[in-house]
Amino acid sequence: MTFALTSSGGINSTALICNFKTTGSCIKMQLLEPFIFLSTTLMAVHKTTLCLILLAACLAAATGGKLSPEYYSSTCPGAPAIVQAGVVAALKNETRMGASLLRLHFHDCFVNGCDASILLDDNATFVGEKTASPNNKSIRGYEVIDKIKGQVEKECPGVVSCADILALAARDSVVYLGGPSWEVSLGRRDSLNASKEAAEVSLPEPTFNLSDLAVNFWAQGVSFRDMVALSGNQSCIQINDGTDSMY
């Protein structure tokens, strides 16, 4: 999750992508339940601007079984490499897709855990998360995940969950863009249901100010300190997309 805030708490149209040198926050967040978040973060780069960066869910424990980095070691050992290759190909074609995949995973995990429910289309029994206001016309990268899923299915039909593919793709995107790596525990199960209402209640809106964000993340078990870990040892690449979006 990448966004910048002005001193008044509003969203700044200039975003910063930063490279951090440690993954301690990720490891710490892996101990939280039901949501575990990577919060490798940022310091103020101007007295009127606070940049928050790379806030992504790196693990969720809301699954039916125990998560493990070796979950597919015997059933689909090539899955992580297939996901990585798919991510690299997508980012070589469009670098900003990395941020989109990171955001896609974050928005998935913030609504009832990392269960790939954000990928589900509306059907006769539910209206899904894709059209929720924080997602509608802003979340992208579905086609990249679909393509990677297809490649994984050719290798190991019916084995690897979409939720795990999203988690791996988020990590691989960060690494490709020069950020830190972390160990991804696997074994999530995909949801068969999705809820537009749940997404609109759980996800932060693009218009949220700093106070709104703090309350929103606190409700998910993420402290303000972990949401914004101040660091003076990072390098930043400034990007101005001319919008007021959070990402």
Image (cartoon, helix red, strand yellow):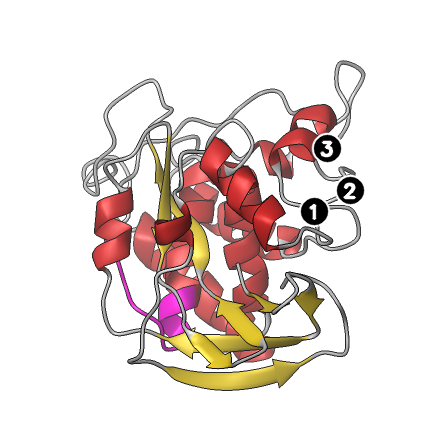
> Of circles 2 and 1, which is in front?
1
Tag on residue 121? Answer: 3
Q: Is residue 42 above or below residue 107?
A: below
User: CA–CA distance between discs 3 and 1?
Assistant: 21 Å
Q: Is residue 132 left or right of residue 47?
A: right
Badge 1, how many Cα within 10 Å: few under 14, some, many 20+? Answer: some
Q: Residue at x 27, y 55 (%)?
A: 25
Whether the residues at callouts 2 and 3 have beta carbons within 8 Å, the answer is no
Q: Is residue 74 above or below residue 89?
A: above
Report whether 53 appears left or right of 11.
left
In the figure, is residue 83 to the left or right of 184?
A: right
Between 197 and 140, the one lying in front of the other is 197
N-terminal-most mark, 2 or 3: 3
Examine the rendering and report whether any part of residue 247 can be seen.
Answer: yes
- The residue segment tinted magenta is 174-183
**Distance of label 2 from label 1 (alpha carbons):** 8 Å
Q: Amino acid at mark 2?
A: Ser
Q: Is residue 95 visible?
A: no
The amino acid type found where label 1 is placed reads Glu
Q: Residues within 10 Å of mark 3 (few under 14, many from 20)?
A: some
- Name the residue beneath numbered marker 1: 205
On residue 133, the disc is: 2
Q: Magenta stretch: residue 201 in it?
A: no
Relative to 94, 167 lies left or right = left
Q: Nearer the viewer, residue 103 or 144?
A: 103
Residues marked 2 and 1 touching at CB (< 8 Å): yes
Task: Look at the picture and state if 21 lies above or below 83.
Answer: below
